[in-house]
Amino acid sequence: MIQSVRFFFFFSMFCRQFVKCSGFRATAVGVTMFRPMVQHCFTDASRLFAAQQDGVKLPRKDPIFHTNTEGQLGTKKFRCLILQNTPGTVDIHQSSPYFGIPLYSCEDDDLIHMVCEIPKGTVEKMEVSFTDEQHAIVQDVTEDGKLRKYQHGPMLWNYGMLPQTYEDPQNPCPHTGLLGDGDPLDVIDLGSSSLCIGEVIKIKPLGALPLIDQGEIDWKIIGINIKDELASHIEDIRDVNEMLPGMLDEIKEWFRVYKVAESKAENKFALDGNYQDKAFAEDLIADCYENLFGLLPRLIAEQEKEQCENEKKSRKPRRPRRTNLH
């Protein structure tokens, strides 16, 4: 156990070279959502850490990502898995979309990776499942077990999550005073192209919208696919109104009222509902990145402790030796 804790301590320090803010914050948060995939997390992390320890240069190109789907979309059997390989090789392997995909691009650390969960123009509420052994993207279910769809209407943008980020549910957000929702950061891609479920793209972060969901802060990162024709013309949130007039108001209104169709109250926003700029968003992303890597040592230690306890319970008691009385 001590070796694993030491491993993840040094690994977390190594990963911090990509973080663009100072001050390490190790958080003491609940880890229920991560437990099913600790072993896969360890495998993905160990590859990178071992390369660094051995003096192997990190790749200068980002991995190539692929998807593999199982079952029929619109059924509970549908699962979308993420595969990746190193450019120029055939080392294709399955990867956790949360732990295995790097947040920051190694080709340009001003860019971040986004995993598309809900493609533009669709109504199925898809998400990375943390109870699935392989972190597959599946359709969310309602409290009564039905597949969840947006009753308000289709998602008007590509929507997904930022890998390796975590909104802290125990320590209040310093900007809003609200606790996080315990999920990865959500992200909205303003690009004109519709993505596929599980598609991984690089985006340019532009800003952030402080949505309040059930009393918790649920930040929405605003970004744009770097392959979009407008990406070179939009550098900050203020440029969006000039290049895409009315879109920011449309996003805020959609997220304010979309739950009304499900007989729920309207959502509210923190910070007077004002969009925060690019610099703010980058710092927020870095903070949520550190939240995860501050959590990993405790996560591994807790699981190994649990495994040791289970092994002790499963051991059969030794039979006493027979003594020869003759």
Image (cartoon, rainbow, N blue to C red):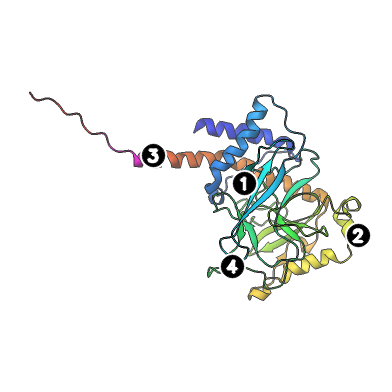
Could you say which is closer to the camera, residue 247 or residue 123? 123
Q: Give the labeled residue for mark 2.
A: 243
Q: Spatial distance from mark 4 to mark 3, Cα to Cα? A: 38 Å
Q: Quadrant of residue 220?
A: bottom right
Q: Which residue is mark 4?
A: 147
Give the residue number, with chain letter if any, for mark 3: 311
From mark 4 to mark 1, how far is it between C-alphas?
23 Å
49 left or right of 241 in image: left
Q: CA distance from mark 1 to mark 2?
A: 35 Å
The residue sitting at 72% across, 57% down in the picture is: 196
Up-down relation of residue 173 to residue 17 (above or below): below
- Marks 3/1: CA–CA distance: 27 Å
Neighbours of disc 1 within 10 Å: few (<14), some (14-19), many (20+): many
Tell me: 29 left or right of 63.
left
Q: Which residue is mark 1?
A: 96
**10 Å crowding of disc 4: few (<14), some (14-19), many (20+):** some
